[in-house]
Image: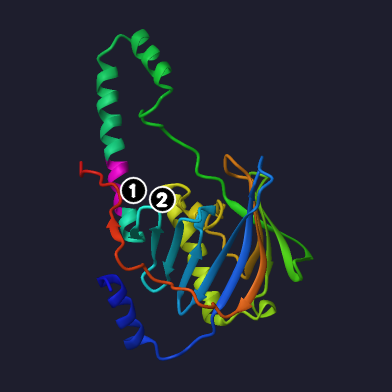
Amino acid sequence: MNSPQRTLILATILFSTTVYADTTIEFGVTESGSAQTRSQIAYVKDGTIFVNGAGGDPKIDLIFARERSSITVINHGDRTYLSFDEEKINELSDRAQGMMSTVQKQLAENLANLPPEQAARMKEMMGNFGMPAGNQPPPPTKKLVKRGIVTINNMKCRQIDVMSNNQKVAQLCVADPSALNLPRDDYETIKAIQAFGERISQKAGQVSGQFGGSVPEFGGVQIDGVPVEMRNFSGPVSSVMTVTRVAAGVGAVSMAIPDGYNPRQLPSIPKM
Protein backbone atom coordinates (compact mmCIF):
# COMPACT_ATOMS: atom_id res chain seq x y z
CA MET A 1 0.00 0.00 0.00
CA ASN A 2 1.49 3.34 -1.03
CA SER A 3 1.65 6.54 1.04
CA PRO A 4 -1.40 8.33 -0.45
CA GLN A 5 -3.55 5.28 0.24
CA ARG A 6 -2.32 5.02 3.85
CA THR A 7 -2.97 8.73 4.40
CA LEU A 8 -6.50 8.50 3.00
CA ILE A 9 -7.37 5.44 5.10
CA LEU A 10 -5.90 6.97 8.27
CA ALA A 11 -7.81 10.22 7.74
CA THR A 12 -11.03 8.27 7.21
CA ILE A 13 -10.54 6.35 10.46
CA LEU A 14 -9.61 9.41 12.53
CA PHE A 15 -12.06 12.00 11.25
CA SER A 16 -15.12 10.14 9.91
CA THR A 17 -17.60 9.96 12.77
CA THR A 18 -20.74 9.75 10.60
CA VAL A 19 -21.48 7.12 7.97
CA TYR A 20 -23.34 8.49 4.95
CA ALA A 21 -25.25 6.63 2.28
CA ASP A 22 -23.40 5.96 -0.96
CA THR A 23 -24.63 6.93 -4.41
CA THR A 24 -24.05 5.59 -7.93
CA ILE A 25 -24.77 7.89 -10.88
CA GLU A 26 -24.80 6.59 -14.44
CA PHE A 27 -24.74 9.05 -17.33
CA GLY A 28 -23.97 9.32 -21.02
CA VAL A 29 -22.09 11.98 -23.00
CA THR A 30 -22.70 12.69 -26.69
CA GLU A 31 -20.74 15.23 -28.73
CA SER A 32 -21.89 16.92 -31.91
CA GLY A 33 -20.92 15.05 -35.04
CA SER A 34 -20.83 11.72 -33.22
CA ALA A 35 -23.64 9.19 -33.07
CA GLN A 36 -21.93 7.34 -30.23
CA THR A 37 -22.83 7.99 -26.60
CA ARG A 38 -20.04 7.46 -24.08
CA SER A 39 -21.44 5.77 -20.98
CA GLN A 40 -19.83 6.57 -17.65
CA ILE A 41 -20.38 5.83 -13.98
CA ALA A 42 -19.65 8.07 -11.02
CA TYR A 43 -19.57 6.82 -7.42
CA VAL A 44 -20.07 9.22 -4.51
CA LYS A 45 -18.91 8.17 -1.05
CA ASP A 46 -17.84 10.08 2.08
CA GLY A 47 -16.87 13.31 0.32
CA THR A 48 -15.21 11.52 -2.61
CA ILE A 49 -16.31 11.10 -6.23
CA PHE A 50 -14.81 8.32 -8.31
CA VAL A 51 -15.45 8.51 -12.07
CA ASN A 52 -14.86 5.32 -14.00
CA GLY A 53 -13.72 5.86 -17.59
CA ALA A 54 -13.43 9.64 -17.28
CA GLY A 55 -13.75 11.54 -20.53
CA GLY A 56 -14.97 8.36 -22.23
CA ASP A 57 -11.55 6.68 -22.00
CA PRO A 58 -11.83 3.25 -20.33
CA LYS A 59 -8.17 3.48 -19.26
CA ILE A 60 -8.70 6.70 -17.29
CA ASP A 61 -10.31 6.98 -13.85
CA LEU A 62 -10.70 10.14 -11.80
CA ILE A 63 -10.92 10.79 -8.06
CA PHE A 64 -12.18 14.07 -6.59
CA ALA A 65 -11.63 14.64 -2.86
CA ARG A 66 -13.91 17.34 -1.49
CA GLU A 67 -12.02 17.96 1.75
CA ARG A 68 -8.71 18.59 -0.04
CA SER A 69 -10.35 20.09 -3.16
CA SER A 70 -8.07 17.94 -5.27
CA ILE A 71 -8.19 15.77 -8.37
CA THR A 72 -6.32 12.55 -9.08
CA VAL A 73 -6.27 11.20 -12.65
CA ILE A 74 -5.39 7.50 -12.84
CA ASN A 75 -4.01 6.14 -16.11
CA HIS A 76 -4.30 2.35 -16.23
CA GLY A 77 -2.58 2.31 -19.62
CA ASP A 78 0.83 3.24 -18.23
CA ARG A 79 0.05 2.55 -14.55
CA THR A 80 0.55 6.16 -13.43
CA TYR A 81 -1.45 8.80 -11.59
CA LEU A 82 -1.44 12.59 -11.56
CA SER A 83 -2.67 14.54 -8.53
CA PHE A 84 -3.23 18.28 -8.30
CA ASP A 85 -5.20 20.73 -6.24
CA GLU A 86 -6.47 24.26 -6.80
CA GLU A 87 -3.42 25.82 -5.18
CA LYS A 88 -1.12 24.11 -7.69
CA ILE A 89 -3.24 25.17 -10.67
CA ASN A 90 -3.29 28.77 -9.39
CA GLU A 91 0.50 28.70 -9.00
CA LEU A 92 1.04 27.46 -12.56
CA SER A 93 -1.47 29.95 -13.94
CA ASP A 94 0.18 32.87 -12.16
CA ARG A 95 3.61 31.81 -13.46
CA ALA A 96 2.27 31.49 -17.00
CA GLN A 97 0.76 34.97 -16.80
CA GLY A 98 4.06 36.35 -15.50
CA MET A 99 5.93 34.72 -18.37
CA MET A 100 3.47 36.15 -20.92
CA SER A 101 3.87 39.63 -19.42
CA THR A 102 7.65 39.36 -19.83
CA VAL A 103 7.29 38.20 -23.45
CA GLN A 104 4.86 41.04 -24.19
CA LYS A 105 7.26 43.60 -22.74
CA GLN A 106 10.20 42.29 -24.77
CA LEU A 107 8.17 42.22 -28.00
CA ALA A 108 6.91 45.74 -27.42
CA GLU A 109 10.48 46.99 -26.86
CA ASN A 110 11.71 45.25 -30.03
CA LEU A 111 8.88 46.60 -32.15
CA ALA A 112 9.45 50.11 -30.81
CA ASN A 113 12.90 50.05 -32.43
CA LEU A 114 11.52 49.17 -35.88
CA PRO A 115 10.28 51.62 -38.51
CA PRO A 116 6.49 52.12 -38.15
CA GLU A 117 5.63 50.28 -41.39
CA GLN A 118 7.81 47.28 -40.50
CA ALA A 119 6.42 47.18 -36.95
CA ALA A 120 2.88 47.22 -38.37
CA ARG A 121 3.70 44.31 -40.69
CA MET A 122 5.20 42.33 -37.81
CA LYS A 123 2.08 42.88 -35.71
CA GLU A 124 -0.09 41.75 -38.60
CA MET A 125 2.01 38.64 -39.17
CA MET A 126 1.79 37.68 -35.49
CA GLY A 127 -1.89 38.49 -35.31
CA ASN A 128 -1.05 40.49 -32.16
CA PHE A 129 0.05 37.23 -30.52
CA GLY A 130 1.90 37.99 -27.33
CA MET A 131 1.23 41.73 -27.63
CA PRO A 132 -0.46 43.76 -24.91
CA ALA A 133 -4.17 43.62 -25.51
CA GLY A 134 -4.85 47.14 -24.26
CA ASN A 135 -8.18 48.01 -22.71
CA GLN A 136 -10.39 44.98 -23.04
CA PRO A 137 -14.09 44.95 -22.25
CA PRO A 138 -15.03 43.01 -19.11
CA PRO A 139 -16.09 39.40 -19.66
CA PRO A 140 -19.82 39.01 -20.34
CA THR A 141 -22.04 38.42 -17.33
CA LYS A 142 -23.85 35.11 -17.33
CA LYS A 143 -27.48 34.98 -16.31
CA LEU A 144 -29.97 32.18 -15.80
CA VAL A 145 -33.41 32.00 -17.39
CA LYS A 146 -35.69 29.45 -15.76
CA ARG A 147 -37.99 27.46 -18.02
CA GLY A 148 -40.59 24.78 -17.37
CA ILE A 149 -40.56 21.41 -15.62
CA VAL A 150 -39.86 18.36 -17.79
CA THR A 151 -39.14 14.66 -17.14
CA ILE A 152 -35.88 13.07 -18.25
CA ASN A 153 -35.35 9.35 -17.63
CA ASN A 154 -38.16 9.39 -15.02
CA MET A 155 -36.51 12.33 -13.20
CA LYS A 156 -38.40 15.61 -12.96
CA CYS A 157 -36.21 18.64 -13.51
CA ARG A 158 -36.44 22.35 -14.30
CA GLN A 159 -34.91 23.54 -17.52
CA ILE A 160 -32.57 26.53 -17.17
CA ASP A 161 -30.95 28.48 -20.01
CA VAL A 162 -27.50 29.95 -19.36
CA MET A 163 -27.33 33.22 -21.32
CA SER A 164 -24.32 35.34 -22.26
CA ASN A 165 -24.79 38.53 -24.29
CA ASN A 166 -28.26 37.32 -25.25
CA GLN A 167 -26.76 34.08 -26.56
CA LYS A 168 -27.66 30.69 -25.06
CA VAL A 169 -24.34 29.08 -24.17
CA ALA A 170 -25.78 26.16 -22.19
CA GLN A 171 -29.02 24.56 -21.09
CA LEU A 172 -29.41 22.63 -17.87
CA CYS A 173 -32.18 20.52 -16.47
CA VAL A 174 -31.85 20.62 -12.69
CA ALA A 175 -33.53 18.22 -10.26
CA ASP A 176 -34.10 18.63 -6.55
CA PRO A 177 -31.70 16.31 -4.66
CA SER A 178 -34.54 15.07 -2.46
CA ALA A 179 -36.47 13.95 -5.56
CA LEU A 180 -33.47 11.79 -6.46
CA ASN A 181 -33.24 10.41 -2.90
CA LEU A 182 -29.73 11.87 -2.83
CA PRO A 183 -28.18 12.07 0.66
CA ARG A 184 -27.25 15.58 1.73
CA ASP A 185 -23.55 14.81 2.07
CA ASP A 186 -23.39 13.29 -1.41
CA TYR A 187 -25.18 16.35 -2.80
CA GLU A 188 -22.63 18.64 -1.16
CA THR A 189 -19.85 16.60 -2.79
CA ILE A 190 -21.48 16.93 -6.23
CA LYS A 191 -21.83 20.69 -5.73
CA ALA A 192 -18.16 20.85 -4.72
CA ILE A 193 -16.89 19.14 -7.88
CA GLN A 194 -19.08 21.38 -10.05
CA ALA A 195 -17.65 24.52 -8.41
CA PHE A 196 -14.12 23.09 -8.57
CA GLY A 197 -14.46 22.30 -12.27
CA GLU A 198 -15.64 25.81 -13.11
CA ARG A 199 -12.84 27.49 -11.13
CA ILE A 200 -10.20 25.26 -12.70
CA SER A 201 -11.56 25.76 -16.23
CA GLN A 202 -11.32 29.52 -15.77
CA LYS A 203 -7.67 29.14 -14.74
CA ALA A 204 -6.45 26.29 -16.90
CA GLY A 205 -8.85 25.67 -19.77
CA GLN A 206 -11.28 22.78 -20.03
CA VAL A 207 -9.70 20.54 -17.42
CA SER A 208 -13.30 19.93 -16.34
CA GLY A 209 -13.76 17.97 -19.55
CA GLN A 210 -12.19 15.07 -17.66
CA PHE A 211 -15.38 15.03 -15.56
CA GLY A 212 -17.26 13.48 -18.44
CA GLY A 213 -17.94 16.41 -20.76
CA SER A 214 -17.18 20.07 -21.25
CA VAL A 215 -18.61 21.96 -18.30
CA PRO A 216 -19.82 25.44 -19.30
CA GLU A 217 -18.48 28.34 -17.26
CA PHE A 218 -21.37 29.95 -15.41
CA GLY A 219 -19.44 33.09 -14.47
CA GLY A 220 -20.05 32.71 -10.75
CA VAL A 221 -23.79 32.08 -11.08
CA GLN A 222 -24.91 29.68 -8.37
CA ILE A 223 -27.15 26.80 -9.39
CA ASP A 224 -29.08 24.86 -6.78
CA GLY A 225 -29.93 21.26 -7.53
CA VAL A 226 -28.45 18.39 -9.48
CA PRO A 227 -28.06 18.74 -13.27
CA VAL A 228 -29.57 15.59 -14.80
CA GLU A 229 -29.01 16.96 -18.29
CA MET A 230 -26.48 19.52 -19.46
CA ARG A 231 -26.24 20.83 -23.00
CA ASN A 232 -23.12 22.87 -23.67
CA PHE A 233 -23.05 25.13 -26.74
CA SER A 234 -20.11 27.35 -25.72
CA GLY A 235 -17.11 25.16 -26.61
CA PRO A 236 -15.63 24.24 -29.99
CA VAL A 237 -17.67 21.02 -29.84
CA SER A 238 -21.18 21.07 -28.40
CA SER A 239 -22.03 18.22 -26.07
CA VAL A 240 -24.91 16.71 -24.11
CA MET A 241 -24.55 14.97 -20.76
CA THR A 242 -27.60 13.06 -19.54
CA VAL A 243 -28.02 11.18 -16.28
CA THR A 244 -29.66 7.82 -16.89
CA ARG A 245 -29.83 6.41 -13.35
CA VAL A 246 -29.27 7.42 -9.73
CA ALA A 247 -29.12 4.56 -7.24
CA ALA A 248 -28.11 3.96 -3.62
CA GLY A 249 -24.88 2.06 -3.02
CA VAL A 250 -21.60 1.86 -4.91
CA GLY A 251 -21.11 -1.89 -5.22
CA ALA A 252 -17.71 -3.55 -5.22
CA VAL A 253 -15.54 -0.74 -6.54
CA SER A 254 -12.17 0.50 -5.32
CA MET A 255 -12.03 4.29 -4.98
CA ALA A 256 -8.26 4.46 -4.44
CA ILE A 257 -5.02 4.54 -6.42
CA PRO A 258 -4.01 0.95 -7.26
CA ASP A 259 -0.85 -0.44 -5.71
CA GLY A 260 2.28 -0.19 -7.84
CA TYR A 261 1.21 2.88 -9.82
CA ASN A 262 3.81 5.65 -10.23
CA PRO A 263 3.13 9.34 -9.61
CA ARG A 264 3.41 11.91 -12.39
CA GLN A 265 3.94 15.67 -12.07
CA LEU A 266 2.24 18.58 -13.75
CA PRO A 267 4.53 20.37 -16.22
CA SER A 268 6.63 22.97 -14.45
CA ILE A 269 6.80 26.63 -15.43
CA PRO A 270 9.92 28.56 -14.37
CA LYS A 271 9.56 31.69 -12.28
CA MET A 272 10.17 34.93 -14.18
**Sooner in the amino-acid sequence: mark 2 or mark 1:** 1
Circle 1 sits on which residue?
A: 93
Residue 12 among magenta residues: no
Whether residue 89 sits left or right of residue 230 in the image: it is left
Q: Position of residue 159 (x, y in %)?
A: 73, 61
Whether residue 268 sits left or right of residue 184 in the image: it is left
Q: Amino acid at mark 2?
A: Lys
Circle 2 sits on which residue?
A: 203
Q: CA distance from mark 2 to mark 1?
A: 6 Å
Indicate whether 11 appears above or below 174: below
Circles 2, 1 touching at the beta carbon (< 8 Å)? yes
Quarter containing the N terminus: bottom left
Q: Position of residue 182 (x, y in %)?
A: 61, 79
Indicate whether 75 appears above or below 165: below
The magenta region covers 91-98
- Dot 1 alpha-carbon crowd within 10 angstroms: few under 14, some 14 to 19, many 20 or more: some
Q: Amino acid at mark 1?
A: Ser
Whether residue 29 sits left or right of residue 269 in the image: it is right
Picture colour scheme: rainbow
Residue in the foreground of this view, choosing between 193 and 265: 265
